[in-house]
Image (cartoon, rainbow, N blue to C red):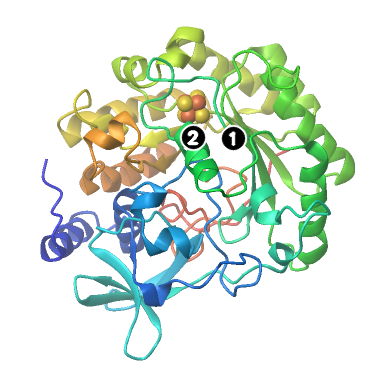
Amino acid sequence: MSTGDGAGSRTALVEDLMERFPHVPKEAVFKEDLLRGGIAFDESALTDTANEASGEVKPKSYFIFSFDHGTLPELGEAALRRPPEEIVLTGGPYGLRRTVVSVRVNPNSPYRVAAGDDGLLGLYLGGRRIADVGLPPMPDYYRHKLANGKSVMEVAPTIQWGYLIYLTVFRVCQYFGAKEECQYCDINHNWRQHKAAGRPYTGVKDVEEVLEALDIIDRYDTAKASTAYTLTGGSITSQVQGRDEADFYGHYAKAIEERFPDRWIGKVVAQALPLDDVKRFHDYGVKIYHPNYEVWDRRLFELYCPGKERYVGRDEWHKRILDSAEVFGPRNVIPNFVAGVEMAEPFGFTSVDEAIASTTEGLRFFMSQGITPRFTTWCPEPTTPLGKANPLGAPLEYHIRLLDAYRSTMDEFGLSSPPGYGPAGAGRAVFSVSSFMDSLAPDEEAVEA
Ligand code: SF4
């Protein structure tokens, strides 16, 4: 497949898609291209973050996966001087509305963030400046440490421009090795590389530390930008600290809700668990459940998610997702899939038409039941089997047509943007790891408890 890697052909590709899909916001076309292919950072765009709490820019926290196109030793300066967690694009020749993009570092990307002659940061494609770049300010709560010296960024980082507190409380996955790990996931590698680099990266977070970090956020986030928290981590097939998956992730929710009742919208990303376990999540105070189905196609699910297939199986997984709507209500069951792996060589679909048809079949399966899936844009991390075989990711056309298909399938079933993601619409969305929220009709978010 040709993805047009040079800057000239990349501009032509982007502009062609903007023309062919005028109802997909042009901001989303750039955002998807940056998410699937990464961003290079000029030294002028990196700040000194030797002491991560003292800088002016909020650094990339590596909140669960690496989401980079190279290992830390391959990233050069960007590994030593952390890049920002996100960037915000505005203006430029395309007149972009405010667009928040999660940072995925790729020193070889044709997109580069650099300071212009005027000293202001811009996003460049080839030599052409295509947008102004804003960086996230260091939040006040990152400047305060826990009593034991740990940073808030390590224990309770925030993403999505401060909207979401991301609590990866278990940094590894019990699906381990080539026969069990999902073929696009680098959670275990990312844990190893941070340990090897001597960075603080707690394997299992202590519940008291989490509460202490949340207390700091609550105290210093005076604008109340933080709105939701996500509890997540690797799958638990046996136990962690004597708890099964529902009790392990659930006991953090219970502690948080007891200490800070309804201060944030509580979300859990976990496996599709049996109904009794799902009820426990709900009883612990979780409001939104993300039992991710990863990829819709049966053959690809079996190949890409061998651990989940072996321990649970695709049909049972889907049944459990539908069942969980009885507990949470269909609006509050939001399973994720990894957009783009449908087209990964050597097993994926070879045409965009087939890939979109398959993905849409999955959307219709869930949306016809009132359940709204959402997706993250696949980042082909090089230490994963699929990333290694597909360093350029999926074709940009797939991602743009998916945005189109997603919105029309939602319209068909009368659904609006899912709760817990902030505002929808180009120029308003804060969800940073795909542009599905940028592509939906503008609305204020509402949580249906
Ligand atoms: S279940 Fe799969 S995607 Fe989830 S953490 Fe484990 S290996 Fe990664």
| Image coords of residue 317 (percent x, y) | 50, 15
Above or below for 236 versus 251 = above
**Which amino acid, mark 2?**
Ile
Location of mark 2 (residue): 187
Label 2 residue SS: helix
Q: Say whether mark 2 is within 8 Å of ligand 1.
A: yes
On the picture, is 300 further left or further right than 371? left
Q: Earlier in the sequence, mark 2 or mark 1?
A: 1
Could you give the CA–CA distance between mark 2 and mark 1, rounded to whole angstroms? 7 Å
Q: Quadrant of the C terminus?
A: top right
On the picture, is 342 further left or further right than 247? left
The local crowd at label 1, few if under 14, some if 14 to 19, many if 20 or more residues have their Cα within 10 Å, is: many
| Image coords of residue 79 (percent x, y) | 44, 58
Residue drawn at (36%, 43%) of the image: 379
Residue drawn at (79%, 44%) of the image: 209
Q: Does residue 292 appear in this view?
A: no
Quick check: marks 2 and 1 in contact, CB under 8 Å?
yes
Q: Nearer the viewer, residue 387 or 147?
A: 147
Give the residue at the far right of this rendering: 258
Location of mark 1 (residue): 171
Q: Does residue 76 appear in this view?
A: yes
Q: Quadrant of the N terminus?
A: top left
